[in-house]
Amino acid sequence: MNNVKYTIGMDFGSDSVRALIVNTATGEEMATAVHYYVRWKEGKYCNPSESKFRQHPLDYVEGIEATIKSVVSQVSKEVVDNIVGIGVDTTGSTPVAVDKTGTPLALLEGFEENPNAMFVLWKDHTGIKEADEINALCAKWDIDYTKYEGGIYSSEWFWSKILHVSRADKSVQEAAYSWVEHCDWVPFLLTGGNDVKQMKRSRCAAGHKALWHESFGGLPPNDFFVALDPVLDGLTDRLFKETYTSDVSVGTLSEEWATRLGLPENVEVAVGAFDCHMGAVGVNIEPYHLTKVMGTSTCDIVVTPMQDEEHLVKGICGQVDGSVIPGMLGLEAGQSAFGDIYAWYERLIAWPIKELIGGTNLISEDVKAQLVEEALGNILPKLSEAAAKEPIGASGELALDWMNGRRTPDANQNLKGVISGINLGSTSPKVFRALVEASCFGAKKIADRFIEEGIAINGVIAIGGISKKSDLVMQIMADVLDAPIKVAKSEQACALGASIFGAVAAGVHANTEVAMDAMASPFEKVYEPIKENVEAYKRVYNDYSELCVAMENHIMKK
Ligand SMILES: Nc1ncnc2c1ncn2[C@@H]1O[C@H](COP(=O)(O)OP(=O)(O)O)[C@@H](O)[C@H]1O
Ligand SMILES: O=C(CO)[C@H](O)[C@H](O)COP(=O)(O)O
């Protein structure tokens, strides 16, 4: 008789959702599945030149069904019968307008194709003006509501997005009873929620991105939002006061979803949280260790014991009691673009390849398609191979990593990327290396800020796609940070973290720490800094810092 219990972890990333079935006694990953969002992949509802990125709720619904059915089909009936919990993490702040029943407007008649009725993805920066207005109001209000969010509110966050969409689209504003984060909606959906006022909201999402704090009595009051714009009048009453950490259960799977997914009905679904926070739990984060989730963007997570005396850390994405491990302070920072910078460069190089091969009459359509696929799949590995041979700082190309603005330190989404120091000898690999170096220098700015603000960093851990895919990026990161970087063994550390919360919420483990000890991923590799590279990068980093100041002054003058 098998007494082992299993949980499912779901990780909704920017491009895809991943699901795992995990043994709660050992952390063994029994099955894994990935689903790429169909509409998103087609580029629907987005306009990158306007930093507008929307995701249709059906992309997520289809993803839940595809991945869970797939993992369930990969294990025995005995395992399925012993699945007791589900944990969910998502990107954020990724909010959507909903009706009273908590249904995203894009799922209602008349709104199906309206991007304003869809989830506003974390990297959507259409609310820059609104973020500026929030910051200006906080600066003159008697309480600075941004103080637990690094002191600067970002266009990536909840209120900037709500205000922007409410102003831009009267039909959505009028139909929106409330707004919900992606990480709150999925557990609500799976447990059959039908009253948005009963939705259990994530402490992590609310504290880092929605200006929620216990000492404020919840969200800022209605008069604050009315002063911002009367269009927000009354909304806080339809949002929430209470928040929950992810060790708490939202409820059990609804009958409908249990049947749809082929799971038992008594499966507990944990309160959701953001991907990077659950990722840190997936690798058993220790206090004062920096966990870097390196993917499309980076998210940098540190936990510390709760301080007796409050110390506000400036310029980060906030400090929240219980956003990572219940009972500890979770601090978040990050870069708005990381792998996305390499993806942009890849697209730049891919364009002539696609055009030239696509336009030739010399080969058949099948061969063309194969050639294009092979060429595109090899761009980043080939560039990395060649860039690794370039000496550090010898030929002068120097870039800034602000292609999607600067998330931290000191959020400023008006900023833009730069490639400088080009001459006629600048090759593709040299420029690529400069982009990689810039992304690592941006990471060093974050680590430096934690240290300047009195948060010691005693170790660095990496998870996320790039920690597995790129030796070049990881070695440069170790050299620039002048610190060894431990890489987690799990390919899906965020989903693993989610499964850990599923196990705590289902009562399999007494608390998050015990569950982490049993289930978290070990490390498989360490990148050690190379002494001469560390020295060489100190010089280039000074140049990068000077270029940051010059460009920020230049852009902000306009
Ligand atoms: N060989 C590579 N070298 C560097 N970056 C890569 C490589 N292959 C993929 N990437 C980057 O990895 C990023 C995706 O990271 P991943 O963690 O898988 O996804 P997500 O951020 O959605 O969770 C993309 O931005 C892509 O540019
Ligand atoms: O800011 C976040 C969490 O607070 C985003 O969720 C994150 O940056 C997006 O993650 P990814 O790069 O893995 O898609």
Image: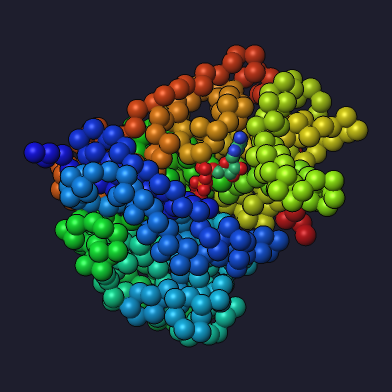
* Residue 118, above or below 67: below
Task: From this view, report whether residue 255 is shown above or below residue 85.
Answer: below
Task: In the displayed orientation, state which residue is furthest to the front.
Answer: 364
Q: Is residue 330 left or right of residue 441?
A: left
Where residue 313 appears, as percent x and y from the top left, is 45, 45
Quadrant (top left, top right, bottom left, bottom right) of the N terminus: top left
Identify the image quadrant of residue 135: bottom right
Q: Residue at x 48, y 39 (%)?
A: 464
Q: Residue at x 43, y 45 (%)?
A: 276
Residue 316 placement (x, y as % from top left): 50, 47
Q: Nearer the viewer, residue 62 or 226?
A: 62
Instruction: Kindly tell me whether residue 52 is visible in this rendering.
Output: no
The answer to whether residue 499 is left or right of residue 141 is left
* Image location of residue 159, percent across then percent down: 49, 67
Which quarter of the image is occupied by the C terminus? Answer: bottom right
Q: Could you say which quadrant of the image residue 371 lies in?
A: top right
Q: In the image shown, does 245 or 500 lie closer to the viewer? A: 500
- Residue at image x 85%, y 46%? 362
Q: Residue at x 38, y 75 (%)?
A: 103
- Residue 320 in the image: state x and y as whole percent: 36, 50
Taking the image as shown, residue 451 lies to the left or right of residue 65, namely right
- Count of number-bearing discs: 0
The residue nearer to you, when weighing 139 against 482, is 482
Whether residue 534 is visible here, answered yes or no, is yes
Quadrant of residue 217 within the rendered picture: bottom left
Above or below — where is 170 with respect to 497? Answer: below
Q: What coloring was used for the rendering?
A: rainbow
Judged from this view, the residue extending furthest toward the right is 424
